[in-house]
Amino acid sequence: MDTLKEILSSFESEYIENYKPTWLKVKIAHSADLLQVAKALKESGLKTISTVSATDFIEDNRIEMNYFFEDMLNRRNCWLKCDISRELENCKIDSITPLFKGASWHERETFSMFGVKFTGHDDLRPIIISQDYYGKNPFRKDFDWDTHEANTVENINLIADSFKREEAENEKNIDPNSSETVLNWGPTHPASGPIRLKVHCDGEDIIGIDPDIGFVWRALEHLVTKKDFVGAIVAVERLCFMDNINSMLSYAQAVEEIADVQITEFAKWMRVILGEVARISSHMMGMGGFYNAMGLHTVAMWNMDMREFFLDFLESYSGARIATASIEPGGVRYPLQKEMLVELQAALDKFDNTKEDIRAIFVKNPTMRLRASKLGFITEDEVHDYALCGVVARASGVKTDIRIDEPYAAYDKIKMDYVTQENGSSQDRLIQLFQEIEQSVDIIKQAKEHVEQKIQSKEFNPIKDHMVKVPKKLPKGEAISRVEWARGEVLMHLVTDEKAKSPYRLKMKAPSFNNTMMLNHLLKGKTLSDIPLVFGSLYICQGDLDR
Amino acid sequence: MLKILDFFDYAKSESLWMAHFCTGCCSLEMAAAMGPRYDWERYGYMPTPTPRQADILIITGLVTKKMLPALLRTYAQIPEPKYILALGACSFDGGPYNDSLAVIKNPTEILPADVFVAGCPPKPEAIINGMEEIKQKMKKGVPSAASQGGLWKEMKF
């Protein structure tokens, strides 16, 4: 950290401060310095850019850029800020994509939402937003939504027109006598979900892939600004329904940090239990998705059977199977009854009874090994370059896990170690999923035992301890909060205004975005039949891809 | 006595195939309904990868503006008679995304649904119940709502 400070102090800055034990927060005075600073940071070991985010301060007539640089291995991170002008002609900043490949789509996103132009970016097209918002910068505070919304039907026709235009252009550009073609993979492909991959192919061979995303863009980051701090969890948990608990957890931590509220020990342990249950249910769908893409539905059925038991626990706890809304700023939403732990035990037993079968039949499956072990390699360097995280990063052997690196909730009191694989092939990512389920079950067992003990010794009161009060109005401030989500790192950057009742700006960084960025790189030169397998192994959910 | 046309309505209704098309997050509960605990194949439902073989289209929750042309095109590719099941609060009025920039507040005004299933997301039992209601409509030969009207005929897709 001290070396980082030294490097940064050679540039003119407004402040350099320690933010968290693992974070340095710095605001540089001139945006022109950015490229130099980024270069210096990269040379000192911060090889990864988590995300790029903008905040629109309309009253001060400035846009504040936030860059989150990370060193995945050494627990050093840097949060870099700088101001740029808000006027559209001057709203420019140097692109860091030439240095950090992982920034590419994040810069495109910021360009689409706020109209920030990144000079030096080689492919600055709009992304995520639907065609009717092109050039309109929908996340700016002065965007007139009502006027735009007045003619929805025309807007939709505009989108349909743009699809047709694209089709006509392809017809024109591609020589009818060649074997080249542009194939749409999705959004109605059974393995794709709502995403469209524009696959340029020559016969069977893939020349390039251009993912077209945004089919489930709900503008969640904009939606939360219209809700109050508690109501916002409804939007936040819909980041992805497979693991919604950990996304709420991330948001709740950010609010608690700004409100300066300490939650109870019991709530912390409950957050661990709920979070791991959600991780398991997500990973089980992930394993199912992998095999579905290969054409075998049995594992999805087996896993869904097990998953139901974990959902039973969530249902007994919150009354809902999936949309639990069970974590809110101040703790966890509901008290814990004894019967709920019985449900949890039933789920754990079910897993313990089935896991050896799953391991023998599906994880060691020779057909799968033959096919998946030769495809979709991601090297360690690529993990750093493209800012991959979570399952994908650990399958390539990178020891990164926010539960250990930057412990939150009660993870600092839990015995766990990094689970990693070596090769980073598609097969490794499947094995990684299974081993992480096992790890999560182990964590739940530890947490459950601890909670039961403390309830017995009357140190925890499960009926009263679950919540502390968080004020409805928050002071001016900002916070970032990272959690290890099912797919990897979720980083939320929350900004609040004076006496705010609702968030001023919430940036959510979710891992599928970077995973999808990799697709072109991984599949170039392969054949069409490899798309479902590599896509399935990357564990992409369109919910957190589009937000 | 059974008339021959009634027999076809009956036969169709007992093997409902749905176009495998996910527009939103309710598809996760739809997957659970396909799973072993709820097992909707008991009732003769099955997902099919191509709309050309499908009988019904399920609007699984939210529909964004960008998704709508694809949804309408999928619907148009399903052979008659075809029915629509709308899942969740989003397909009725936008649900939790009612204030969102990108989600259509009234997808069923554009593409009218025959049966709505409430919930966010609806439980698998509710989804199966909704499918059963469609079955009844098919048996009686009730014409589908989307064939009667809706904005979709005027839109480009």
Image (cartoon, rainbow, N blue to C red):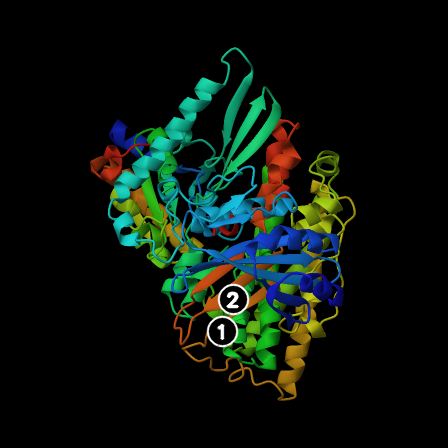
Q: Is residue B128 above or below residue A493?
A: above
Q: In terms of depth relative to the viewer, which is nearer, A69 or B35?
A: A69
State the quadrant of the N terminus of chain B: top left
Which one is in front, B32 or B128?
B32
Q: Chain of mark 1?
A: A
Question: In screen coordinates, is B148 left or right of A436?
Answer: left
* SS under mark 1: loop
Q: Is residue B22 left or right of residue A363?
A: left
Q: Where is mark 2, residue-wise? A: A251
Mark before the other along the chain sequence, 1 or 2: 2
Q: Residue A382: which quarter of the image?
A: top right
Q: Are marks 1 and 2 in contact (CB under 8 Å)?
A: yes
- Residue A277 image point, x, y percent: 59, 63
Residue B11 visible in this rendered orientation of the protein = no
Residue A198 seen in render: yes
Provide the residue designation for mark 1.
A329
Q: Which quadrant would the C terminus of chain B be assigned to in this image?
A: top left
Spot occupied by residue A394 in the image (x, y as percentages of width and height): 72, 52
The location of residue A129, given as percent across then percent down, is 42, 45
Q: Chain of mark 2?
A: A
On the same chain, marks 1 and 2? The answer is yes
Task: Judge whether A467 appears above or below A415 on screen.
Answer: below
Residue A258 vs residue A360, the one in the foreground: A258
Image location of residue A458, percent across then percent down: 62, 89
